[in-house]
Amino acid sequence: MSIFTKIAEGEIPSYKCAENEEFYAFLDINPLVKGHTLVIPRREVDYIFDMEDDELARFQVFAKKVAVAIKSAFPCVKVGQAVLGLEVPHAHIHLVPMQSEKDMNFSNPKLQLSSEEMAAIADKIYKEFAK
Ligand code: 5GP
């Protein structure tokens, strides 16, 4: 079982931002900026481009709804999307609220946020998603 499956199933705690029966969104534990979110399918698949077309389309539409919620919770120029998958072998989309292109540089130092701050960020996104 991948670490992200354990997160989606609640075996490992996460800061939940959104969910439905097929997909789950939670804060990246090492955020580039406040609101940096990961979106995953509950189904275990490593490489995003191994997903069937219809599942991939639903995944992207779910990520879009999460991005809209992030932008409402954390005003930004745009929410950037990236897929790397070099560290965790479970497909995931990074959603990053950007003030500039520099915010999407994955080599940047990561923010150190307290658990209270992380919980408050996730709660804000979750409430926007539920609207
Ligand atoms: P990638 O696979 O896209 O190269 O990187 C994996 C991303 O997942 C990284 O940004 C990393 O901070 C994040 N990540 C890795 N393990 C965990 C975890 O246990 N919990 C959370 N919330 N994020 C994680």
Image (cartoon, grey):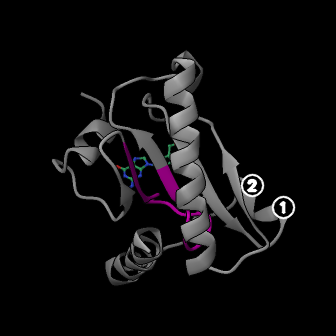
**Left or right: residue 79 compared with residue 51:** right
Q: Secondary structure at mark 1?
A: helix
Disc 2 target residue: 105
Magenta segment boundaries in residue numbering: 23-38
Which quarter of the picture shows residue 48? top right
Q: Secondary structure at mark 2?
A: loop
Q: Position of residue 43 (x, y in %)?
A: 33, 29
Q: Position of residue 62 (x, y in %)?
A: 51, 48
Q: Is residue 21 above or below residue 76?
A: above
Q: Is residue 85 above or below residue 53?
A: below
Q: Which one is in front in this view, the residue at disc 1 or the one at disc 2?
A: 1
At x 55%, y 29%, the residue is 56
From the viewer's perspective, is residue 19 above or below residue 72? Answer: above
Going by the image, does 71 lie left or right of 3?
Answer: right
**Residue in the image at 41% along x and 23% along y:** 45
Say what amino acid the circle numbered 1 marks: Glu
Furthest toward the right, the residue is 101
**Classed neighbour count for the residue bearing mark 2: other residues with Cα under 10 Å, few (<14), some (14–19), many (≥20):** few
Name the residue tied to disc 1: 101
As for residue 24 lying within the magenta part, the answer is yes
Say whether marks 1 and 2 touch (CB < 8 Å). Answer: yes
> Does the magenta-highlighted stretch encompass residue 43?
no
Is 103 in front, or is 42?
A: 42
- Location of the C terminus (image quadrant): bottom left
